[in-house]
Image: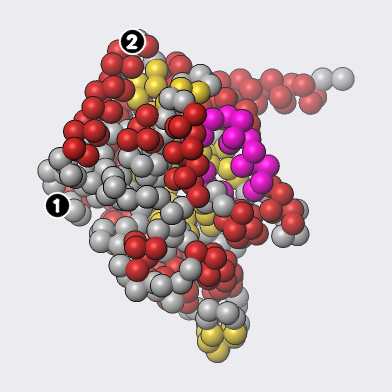
Amino acid sequence: MPVEFLGIGATNDGSETTPRSTAAFDPEHTLRLARAHEDHGWDRVLFAYGSGSADPAQAAALVASKLDRLQILLAHRPNVSYPTFAAKTFASLDRISRGRLTVHFITGGNDAEQQREGDYLSKDERYSRTAEYIRIVKRAWTETEPFDHDGEHYRFSGFAADVRPHQQPRPRVSFGGSSPAAYRAGGAEADIYCLWGEPLARTAEQIDAVHAAAAAAGRTDRPKIQVAFRPIIAPTEELAWEKAHRVLSRIEARKAAGQRVGNRHHTDRPQNTGSQRLLSIADQGERFDRALWTATAAATGGAGNSNALVGTPETVAQALLDYYDLGVEILSARGYDILDDAIDFGRHVIPIVREEVAKRDAARAGAVVEP
């Protein structure tokens, strides 16, 4: 089973520990970071979405036009454009990248963030809209004749896209969430289902829930599973934990100064199930399994990808392999010093994981062919 690595396509150098020193969208920094990923063994980078952030599609187009191998994961929220328009944007970007695009659809788990761009639907209504949106985009990518649509959220007649994706029949669709509504929507429509890093046992439960939702939707295949972490690595275990506590101290210092850490202000209570799960796990303890550390999730209020893996490159690689053994095929990682950590992770962790995966695949193939 192949393994893929997803990094972050940040448009500036800010993080939870460091205020940015660049513009919110710095093209030179964006390209420098993307090249660091391409040069150090990563498969793709995520261009994330925020209500006030730079347009991720434009940043992705910049990288796709300048780099030859790095794949793109483009985050998109359905409330910001009509699905037929979005389908053309995605198809055009897939052409620019010569087939390196995957689209990650974000339903939105925070009412205030959604309302900043005029979206006042309830959470359940947003999931219903996202599922309908994805179905329309898929049809726009693949239909060869004009088609009509009359649904709960969208209605149009005779749409026909002249621009087609480079990938055939279409780019992959990525989706995430940790609620029953998310499992239903993503289980039905996603090629890739994204989870935030949790202890192994709880991750296994979520994978089972996604697979069950896919089966309930009548699918004969299953979405690939992606899990995300914040790796903190150093040459020795002692140095890695010293580094981890320095990271935590910097997060706490920014909180004390009233600055944002993650996607929310630290006084906000998370509405989305994924963040609530991260905080619930942190309440149960700081350390789980081989290397999972929840203190960073607790400090940021469970803001997005926030649980860390701490240790030497060998320890973190083995921790990632534990998730691979659960059936996780895409490993997402993002450090706190975004550029340098991407280079270090690519140099020291990715080769170990790939080598061990190759050994597992060879052993599995040998077991199949032996009499």
**Does residue 138 show up magenta in the picture?**
no
What x and y, as percent, mark residue 200? 58, 29
Q: CA distance from mark 2 to mark 1?
A: 36 Å
Question: Hey, which quadrant is residue 79 in on the image?
Answer: bottom left
State which region is magenta: 191-210
Above or below, 223 relative to 295: below
User: Which class describes the residues within 10 Å of circle 2: few (<14), some (14-19), or many (20+)?
Assistant: few
Above or below, 190 relative to 230: below
Q: Secondary structure at mark 2?
A: helix
What x and y, as percent, mark residue 191? 59, 53
Residue ID at (39%, 15%) = 312
Sequence-earlier tag: 2 or 1: 1
Q: Depth-wise, is mark 2 or mark 1 nearer the camera?
A: 2
Q: Quadrant of the N terminus?
A: top right
Residue ID at (43%, 54%) = 271
Q: Quadrant of the C terminus?
A: top right
Question: Hey, which quadrant is residue 36 in on the image?
Answer: top left
Q: How many marks?
A: 2
Residue hosting label 2: 238
Residue hosting label 1: 23
Residue ID at (63%, 41%) = 207
Answer whether residue 331 is visible to the viewer in this image: no
Residue ID at (53%, 70%) = 125
Horizontal arrangement in the rendering, residue 361 relative to residue 235 (left or right): right
